[in-house]
Image (cartoon, helix red, strand yellow):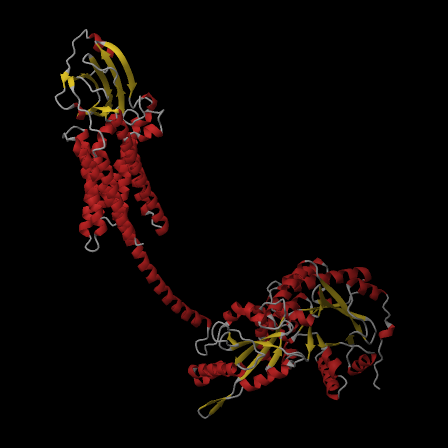
Amino acid sequence: MQVTEIKNIGIAIVFIITVLLFGLRYSNDVPSLEPLQLMDASVYIDESNRLSIDALLVETTPLKWQPLDQDIATLNLGYSSQTHWFKIQFKDLSSDVRFLYLDYSLLDVVEFYQTNNKTLEKTVFTGDKQPFSSRLFGNENFIFSLDKVDNHTTVFLKVYSEGILKIPLSLKTLSQMMAETQYISLTLGSYIGFMLFTMIGCVIVSIITKNTDFLYYSAYFLFSLLLGLNVNGFLFHWVWPDYPEINKYAVNFLFYAAGYAQLMFVEKYLKNLTPKNANILLLSKILTLIGLGFSLAPGFYNYANFSTFFFVIFINFLSVYLSVASYRRKTESRQKELYFVFAWVFYSFSMMLLIFDALNIIKFPNSVNNYVIAAYAIQIIFLIASVVDNYEKIRKSSIQEAKRSVQELEQRQIIERHMLFQATHDSSSLLPKKQILLQNWSVIKEYIPTHRKIDVLIIHFEGYYSIVLAFGQELADMLVSGLHERIKKEIATNKQFSVVDYDWNNDKAVVLDSLDICLVYIEKENEDINENLLELHKTISAPFKYQDISLDVVLSIGVSELLSSETISSGIRKAQVASREASHRKLDLLQYQHTLGYDPEYINILLSKFKKALEHDGLNLVFQPQIDTSTGKVFGVESLLRWSDEDEGVLSPDMFIPIIEKSALINDLTDFVIRKSFQFYEEHIKKFGAPIQLSINLSARNFTDKNLLKCISRYLIQYNIDPKYITFELTETIFLCDLESSKHSFNQLLELGVKLALDDFGTGYSSLVYLKELPFSELKIDKSFLIKDFHTKQGTGLVKAAIELGKSLDMLVIAEGVESFELAKQLKRYGCDICQGFYFSKPMKDKDFIEWYSIYNVDKNIIENRFE
């Protein structure tokens, strides 16, 4: 069912209910009212509010009673705050007339006195200031029973109200009372049900559309309902029957509350008001809230009550003005605005009639009340119609907006998918990038058998920038794109390469940075992966033809086995490390091994562990003696560093020292070695008294440390060591870059009194210039000459030449790595007097060295100096 159909049905129902109520009210089935046949009807205004019934009956002082000229059935005294006494004498009444009916509910004090020949026969005290139980009949109006009325019967009514004073009196029979009660019950029930239906409908629409404006519409209908119920005495009867004081403030409060809800209704319904009208509406709401506050303030009841009438007129005219202005400003689809104008016009008309009638400004016949009720009903009809049309407009607008949103969403999805593809794929080859592999790895892994090994491959393209310089950027990019296509084509049918892009093109290659291609390789059982990958390398590195030129392609492949507990990101990183190292070594293929020392991750882990060991005494020094083969005496001792890690085991200095030299830890390490070596030397002197030479290794990085000389000086003084017994061993890498700077640093060390030795002679970039220009006192022949090459003619010739060179420069020559008596004898023959190696002793801890030195036999290491 369409919303417009619901609207039409609702309007029809309201019209039918209205017609039925009017028909029921005025049908011939309802007995006609008994006209009042009065002998006398007069009124006395008690300005002092002190006159009693006893004084009236005695009448010691004649009172000025004013005869009532108008029909007492519609008696209206307007706005008054004085006590009025009514004296009524009836003519003969029919036997079925039983009740005097006062058809007005808003009276504060009503006192009924029935007398006969000035004798008080019956008294009733009631009114809105009394509990509801004070009324003879549970009705919103005031009803008094008439007993034994004759020509001598006089009825006195005392009426007081702080507001409108209407005293419409009539006589009713029992059947008329019952019919009136049924009519009022049906009318009130229909009114309550209809208003509740309207409120609930607005709330439901607000929930469905998520438009809070309908809650304001519902609030208006709610306060309108409460106001109508209070005016008709329903709230006094059913809600607070024992608290009549509430009635005094409830009417004014509900008038202002309903007025504020009405202004909010208009504001939310019309929405786009002009700045001028919006300011008027805002000011009106503020004044309404002020009036709402005064309506509850003690002592301001009369003022609030009187100002309520002007307030109601004002906000209704304002509602009409704003709705008309909105209607005129809009040029298209003005149906709901027209309904809104009609609603407030009819409502304003009905309210003005009621107010003018209540204030007794204009006297209307009884039939006018029927038109007022009809106007109010029509206002509700138009309001509902406007609200329904507003909802229909919102619904259609929502549908159109939803359609536009769907279209925009579809278009945006197409654009986003296109942008996502561009962001996740290489622009030239359209191969997926790294993030595709990372995001989809959990799915990719499901397609790989669990018992198969997984390898991550990185194919690195060399020579890109050389081609850029030689042929330009465009050709270099074409070459890269062609390489991508070549790899893509080569592995497309090879099932050992896993698909890495199931969402787009089922590609098997991933572009990392144009020059690096990543592949996932699934090994077969007992497969020689190197052989297959080298074959792949050969195929994809074939030269490219450009015009008449053949462009060589230099590739290096790094391979890393992906462990079950390892992430794909880690596997990619390790394969990249291997490919870079393969490129550096000029290799076609290289398997990743973290212990090779070129893995940044491994280096960082190693540095972290080394720092911890340095800070918590995890490093040790060992000492290897140097023997004078002529005398057999201990010439000196070399301090050597040792490190044993829980995870890595015993690490060779050749493996971790180059790493430490590239970090900031080298200076702290040098400080540690010097301090521990000097401590050992101090203990040795204290124990044995005889000084020996102490050799300590220095790194090239130490020469950039400005605190090196201060460190050495401080420890020489602290441990009371003669600097002439200290030798610092230096490698040729110290002075390769700047000879003059090296000479300056050397001279500073020599000024301390220490000696300098050239370590690892022959393994670096040996040059006679260094031996000539730099003041070395010792020359150490590297052990690699003795271990690998000494048994060859060329090797022995080089060692002999090195010894003779040192001797010719007045340098003390020391040979490292002497592991046999035969080698010691041979070195002695060539003129090498100092030997160091396992033949004499392995490196020992400080305590072991002291023990070894204590029992050392000089004679056994005297080697005769003769030639065979």
Quadrant position of residue 597: bottom right
Residue ID at (35%, 45%): 203
Q: Extreme left residue here?
A: 69
Compare residues 281 and 662 and report the one nearer the observer: 281
Residue 430 placement, left or right of 103: right
Q: In this view, does 531 lie above or below 419?
A: below
Percent coordinates x, y for residue 304 in the rendering: 25, 29
Residue 749 visible in rendering: yes
Percent coordinates x, y for residue 854 in the rendering: 85, 64
Residue 50 visible in rendering: no
Residue 214 placement, left or right of 864: left
The quadrant in which the N terminus is found is: bottom left
Q: Extreme top residue here?
A: 60
Compare residues 31 and 454 and report the one nearer the observer: 31
Residue ID at (49%, 81%): 484
Percent coordinates x, y for residue 237 in the rendering: 33, 28
Quadrant position of residue 624: bottom right
Compare residues 682 and 314 and report the one nearer the observer: 314
Residue 558 placement, left or right of 328: right
The quadrant in which the C terminus is found is: bottom right
